[in-house]
Amino acid sequence: MKILAIDSAAKQASLAVWENGRLLAQVYIDVGMTHSQTLMPAAENLLSAAKLQIEDIGLFAVSKGPGSFTGVRIGVAAAKGMAAALSKPCIGVSTLEAMAENLRLPFEFYGCAVMDARREQVYNALFHYKNGGIIRLCEDRAISVHGLINELSKLSPFPVILVGDGADLCYNNRASLSEIYKAPPHLLYSCAAGVAAVAERLYSEDADFDPGELAPEYLRLSQAERERNSV
């Protein structure tokens, strides 16, 4: 089954076509344009390059958050719209879990997926990589940078690898911790291939994914909502 995956939860946007554990094609965009400008033209170009029609897609997948409020909304709306028009299933995937797929490395370690949430906070999830598998250690959450560093200091005996656009923020605040590293640049940011990989696994476990049920997951209120509630 072919999967069309979308990731627009951060400043970058990417789309991928995936089938049976294999990446067929992917496009990555980080040129300062809004996701509303780039996503649909990129989807058309990606399918054309892969010699596919939109009807060939059996499953749509999208990063449903956490991340940029606007970016998540745009991606979710695009995936839901295409899936609903074709009466195909649509899966929402944790941005952090998709990001964790970048770090399938041949040794045992802890992965720390982290996105900058502003105000000295990050969106985060922790994972243990062992024997080729990934074990999730906590749910997606919003946490202070210093609170996260304190948790990382208690992980042992394996190194910690940071992945995501919050990696620099955590790395620069790691204090005296020596076993914390940043992922290399080509693995650092979220991408649609990771979304597709997670979606394929979820779909194999439960085939009922109605696009009408998919909703963004932000983890916290937007600034406008926080300001409105404080009045």
Image (cartoon, rainbow, N blue to C red):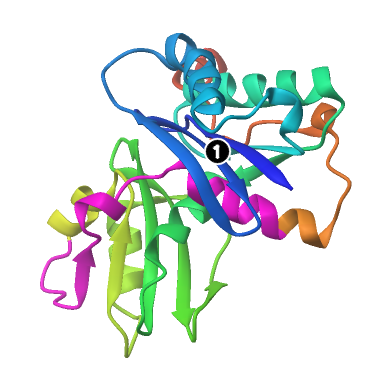
Displayed quadrant of residue 135: bottom right
Place of residue 70 in the rendered image (x, y in percent of width and height, measured from the top left): 49, 19
Say which of 103 and 171 sits in front: 103
Residue at 73%, 18% (x, y): give it: 81
Q: Is residue 132 above or below residue 203?
A: below
Quick one: SS at disc 1? strand
Residue at 45%, 38% (x, y): give it: 26
Residue 175 sits inside the magenta stretch = yes
From where the camera sits, is residue 140 visible? Answer: no
Mark 1 = which residue?
65
Residue at 77%, 38% (x, y): give it: 58
Residue 128 sits inside the magenta stretch = no
Callout 1 amino acid: Gly
Displayed quadrant of residue 51: top right
From where the camera sits, is residue 154 visible? Answer: yes
Q: Which residue range is magenta in the image?
A: 174-201
Place of residue 83 in the rendered image (x, y in percent of width and height, measured from the top left): 77, 26
Place of residue 8 in the rendered image (x, y in percent of width and height, measured from the top left): 47, 29
Place of residue 71 in the rendered image (x, y in percent of width and height, measured from the top left): 48, 23
Say which of 194 and 228 sits in front: 194
Displayed quadrant of residue 110: bottom left
List the single residue furthest toward the bottom: 157
- State left or right for residue 85 relative to residue 114: right
Q: Is residue 204 above or below residue 212?
A: below
Q: Is residue 140 above or below residue 60?
A: below
Residue at 26%, 20% (x, y): give it: 31
- State left or right for residue 101 relative to residue 179: right
List the single residue furthest toward the top: 37
